[in-house]
Amino acid sequence: MNVEDFVDALGCDFYTGVPDSQLKALCNYLMNTYGIDEKHHIIAANEGNCTALAAGYHLATGNVPVVYMQNSGEGNIINPVASLLNDKVYAIPCIFVIGWRGQPGIHDEPQHIYQGQITCDLLDLMDIENFVIGEDTTSEELKTVMNDYNKVLDSGKSVAFVVRKNALTYSEKVEYVNDNDMVREEIIEHIVNVTGEDPIVSTTGKASRELFEIRESNNQSHKYDFLTVGSMGHTSSIALGVAINKPDEKIWCIDGDGSALMHLGSLGVVGNVKPKNLVHIVINNAAHETVGGMPTVASTMNLVNIAESCGYSHTVSVDNFDDLDKELEKAKNTDELCFIEVLCSIGARDDLGRPTTTAIENKENFMEFIK
């Protein structure tokens, strides 16, 4: 189905969400049509954030908002859906558009398998009527469903469209770029060169895939790395838990701007605990690159000042490899909580692979190594 027909059937003019590769057609359409426009389209930090933002839009306008996300974000919307939107509370209607990763019968990465199995069950449990859109769904069929859903929305309840892979199409191209020169895979290579046999906790998405391939290329063991293939936004908290309980080990956290923003409050917890053996590196390309390149708000934020305010002892931003190497060596040899922002370009190799070990193997090898 053309995404223009999908948008026309919904009949809404305000969208907010967290980008997803299954919804790339919709995301690109919104960026081409509105860009980032507070009246029509806002990319949020996490799915609960955009659900609450949508509620505010409805309170101010009386209109129905659209919230888009990957199904992994359903967990983040449970609280605002149950305690804010629900018709037994404020009866705020919302249309959710959810990319279906891990759809049963379709091969996908391990972090999506169970989430894919329970995607529609969770919506049912939250009393959100849902309809699955596939490649064979017609615009006429969608309009019929939407006519029924408008009655549901009028009653103060929410509805959802669960979008299968390739169900939405968009012919226009969107190129996402920034002015930074450093390439993420090279940044991670420099990190690996300094960390040696120190444990690394890396964020979900291409960063972990690149770290895995760097180890392969260097003929190094993968036991040093915990690859956070899911749980976006929680990498620094995982690293904190490791650092607290392994005080004699230098623990490195490779994070991304989208991940750091998703649960930014975790920086306050890290800064309060202030583990002297933790180095938190945020590779900032101001983009949700793994799912298509749509922008984050990180380009307009001073993450270094935020980290300093949260209690990190040493904070710095670098935009070249000479300064990166100096800061990595300094962090390696200091006993204080460090935060390093690395300004990064958007883009990755077309032939970038995925980890060939299972998530369980990764966990067990990492635990055995740091034992």
Image (cartoon, rainbow, N blue to C red):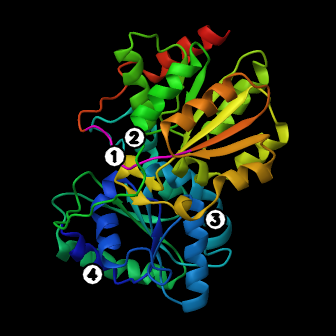
Measured in 3D between alpha carbons, the distance from the residue under mark 3 to the one under mark 4, in whole angstroms, is 27 Å
Q: Which residues are magenta?
A: 342-349
Q: Which x, y percent locates residue 21?
A: 33, 52
Q: CA distance from mark 2 to mark 1?
A: 7 Å
Snapshot quadrant of residue 104? top left
Instruction: Look at mark 1 in the image and give the residue it sits on.
Output: 347
Label 3, label 1: how far apart the Cα atoms are: 34 Å
Residue 263, given in percent of the width and then of the height, sits at 64, 51
Q: Find residue 224 and report its horizontal and vertical position in percent.
A: 55, 16
Q: Nearer the viewer, residue 173 or 63?
A: 173
Q: Residue sitting at 55 percent across and 75 percent down?
A: 54
Nearer to us: label 4 or label 2? 2
The mark lying in front, picked from 2 and 1, is: 2
Query: Is residue 273 depicted above or below 169 in this figure?
Result: above
* Marks 2 and 1, the one that precedes in the sequence: 2
Using the image, tell me which numbered label, if any, was put on residue 80: 3
Query: Which residue bears the numbered disc 2?
Result: 183
